[in-house]
Image (tube, coloured by chain):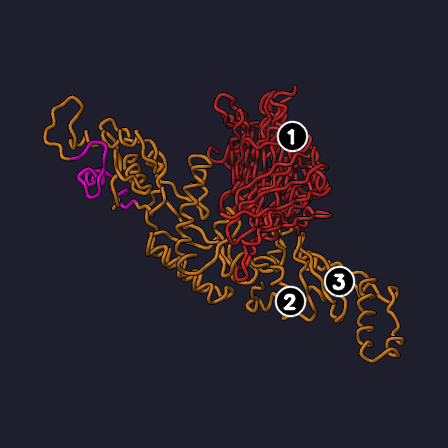
Amino acid sequence: MVYCGAVLFVPKGFLPGHGLGYGQDLMYTIRHGVSVGISRRYWRFVWLILLISCGPFLCSDPISKSDSTYPPSTAAVPVFTTPSTFGPNKAIVPSPQVRPRVVLGTYRVGRHEELAYELSIAPCDSDECIFQIRLLAGNAEVSSIDMGWAKASGKASRETAAESSGLGDPLDVEKKSAWSTGEEEANVLTTATPVRLTSQLNGLLVGQRAGFERFKRHYDLYVAVGKKLIRAWTFQEGAGPTWSTVEVREKGGGGPQSVLLFDGFRYPSNDQPDWLYFTVYSWNSSKNELQSISGDPMVTALIAGPYDTVAEARAAHASAGCLSGFWVLTSGAFLQLHPGKFVLAAITARTPQAQRKLEEVRTCAPKFSVSLLDSRYRQPESN
Amino acid sequence: MPDIKDSVGDSGTNIVHDVAMVQAMLTVIKDAKNNPYLPDYDGKPGPATTKAITAFQTDQGLVAKPGVPDAGATEKAGLVAKASTTLAKMVAALPADYKDMLIIEGTSTVYFPGDENDSKASQKTILGKNDLNLEFRTKVAKLVDQMYTNNKIVLWVTDSGWKRTFDEQQKIATSGTGATGAGPGESNHNFGRAVDIGFNKFTFLKAGGAKASDDWWLNVLTKNGKDAIGNAKALQLWAARDAIGVKNIGLFNSILAGDVDHLQSFDDHLPNDKALADLLNRAGKMKWEAEHKSPRRYTCDLGLGATMLNVGKATEIWAGKATVTKKMIAQAKTDALIKAALPKGPAALKAVVPVLEKDIKDDNVKQMQKALRDDFAAAEAKWDQWKTVP
């Protein structure tokens, strides 16, 4: 084993905290397994002299100097080598540049002041980088999980996502801010929202929407159990024309929050109505699980119809552009309606959203008789 | 006829498909009290499976009952070996309409064979689709054929999974349902080189030994047993399709996780917008470029051979509402005059009279928007000339 040394000068503006306003710390993971944690408090004083273990013919530049996400203003990364390592006939093999960790956000765990969740793109030397959740105690990583479902390109930018981003109420047209990485089918939008699971514990709900030709969505809830990070719940859309969104709902009084999942499938044919599941989850502290609440949940629904056939309902749906958020459902999905027919329905857990949508539909599709209904909602397999 | 490739149960090899098949049989076969030996199957070995095997063997007299002296039992309790008496007895105990249960290696879903005539009809339909690229549709038909030959499963292109016209793509892209980000000419489905192909009348065994018929996307299986388990089972079947279509035949699947029904003729990493610009340049009258960043926008020389100007998104261009202003047309025309004068020397350049915004009429803007759309229409008409661009 031969050693070579590296001197790093870390300039102002290089740290995520300066570049994006989200970072709490920075971990440089250097090829060959050497990691150096640099506290934000000390960045002004940082002159690091590192000894990097190198292969006999290899000494890699540990920090990307060309990462446009965090352009260092005066990056100086001199690398000096032991002369005897590289003889005249021994070529230095260039290694891929490792981009440093891209911190997308940090969020308090709640119970322990010093613990925080960090959503980041892990250090990476390719265009397919791992989204990672880390549990930090101060600046030190105590636990981490690779997200795995979608890969990041390494560069992330803030983007205002359309309502199909997969986070928020189905009728909430408010634009959401999300991290965007990659292009076309490799595009991934990522959002993160803390969820108050108990009075002393927050979880971190991460939603991702990937794709271009078609969109797919995936959700994970990460929770710190003691000092171990667990993936307490996950949902991903299956094949075909799927759609989903997740909302965090207040129960009132500052108590635990619920997670609502709307999970639908729009059948592209006239012989079958759509599927739309609506599931309410709450935290089970004894099992450390997010569990679905049994029974038919209450929804506020906008209802048009009824129609005798799926084809009639679909024709009505197609006739007005502002009914795009509506689904062709069996009337039996709503306990208050007579079964055996089909309706156009949009459901929400927020009555004000429903009222706002009702006004919008009455303006843009006046020929439709749309009514507001508070009802128990039955899942597709039972209606 | 149900079979296993290796042993299942106590100290067995317990390969997932063998375990699932034995478990599946034990959900169908009833004991003397008309109860199934197992309530469900998942392909995972464990004490419940071993106990159910032992119970079946005991009821069949294949092993000694607890506390009863061995009366010549030949089978090992809690184990089903390949070609064993226990296995033969299990198969014999199945109702007649369950004796054709099948399972694919590496999967954990037991299913029933599809109709060969349906498979042939599917192939015939695919081969008859002249708006699919010939080489591509031949490969897709071959996939359908091999999937049936190997696994007795019928594959079928979904109603919305064929080639889409630009009008159809526009409708989906602007529907507000959040289904796609691809506008006209930006979808893999617009040029006859992609299909969404799923499972036709797929019938599988679900919990409790009942048969369930699924849709093209395996929604019933996906939702069966709740998300994680159902999804995993369904993904195994999609992987079995890709083992033939992608690995053997050379089709490509989507790089998007979960977009499993989609298959196409080219690597999904390649940029669609650049390929569209390339086709527009070959089929249309103007010069086009793709910006290749979100949101997708295109630049065009407006047919004047000079400055490239941002004319908006594909959905806007196809709607006849491309980003075109009088100022843009005036600029493009002036730049074209300058470009033409440059080789002729300073005098010619000095003689150029700039085109002013006021010289451009409302009709000129509309005509330009129509001309831009016409280029898109020309590209659609020459869909079979579409090719990938690095």
Q: Colour of chain B?
A: orange
Number of other residues with Cα within 10 Å of mark 1, as a class: few under 14, some 14 to 19, many 20 or more: some
A7 relative position to B108: left or right: right
Looking at the image, can residue B100 be seen?
yes
Residue drawn 56% across the image and 51% down it: A59
Residue that mark 1 sits on:
A350
A2 relative position to A355: left or right: left
What residue occupies the far left of the structure in this picture? B72
| B128 shown above or below B347 | above
Q: Amino acid at mark 1?
A: Arg
Residue B285, picture quadrant: bottom right
Gap in angstroms between the C-alphas marked 2 and 1: 46 Å
x then y, percent, for residue A197: 58, 24
Of circles 1 and 3, the one toward us is 3
Looking at the image, can residue A312 be seen?
no
Residue B323, picture quadrant: bottom right
Q: Which residues are magenta?
A: B75-101
**How many labels were placed on the picture?**
3
Residue that mark 2 sits on:
B280
Q: Amino acid at mark 2?
A: Leu
Residue A81 magenta-drawn? no
* Disc 3: host chain: B
Tell me which numbered mark, 2 or 3, is placed earlier along the sequence. 2
Q: Which mark is residue B309?
A: 3
Decide which of A346, A11 is in the foreground and name it.
Answer: A11
Q: Colour of chain A?
A: red
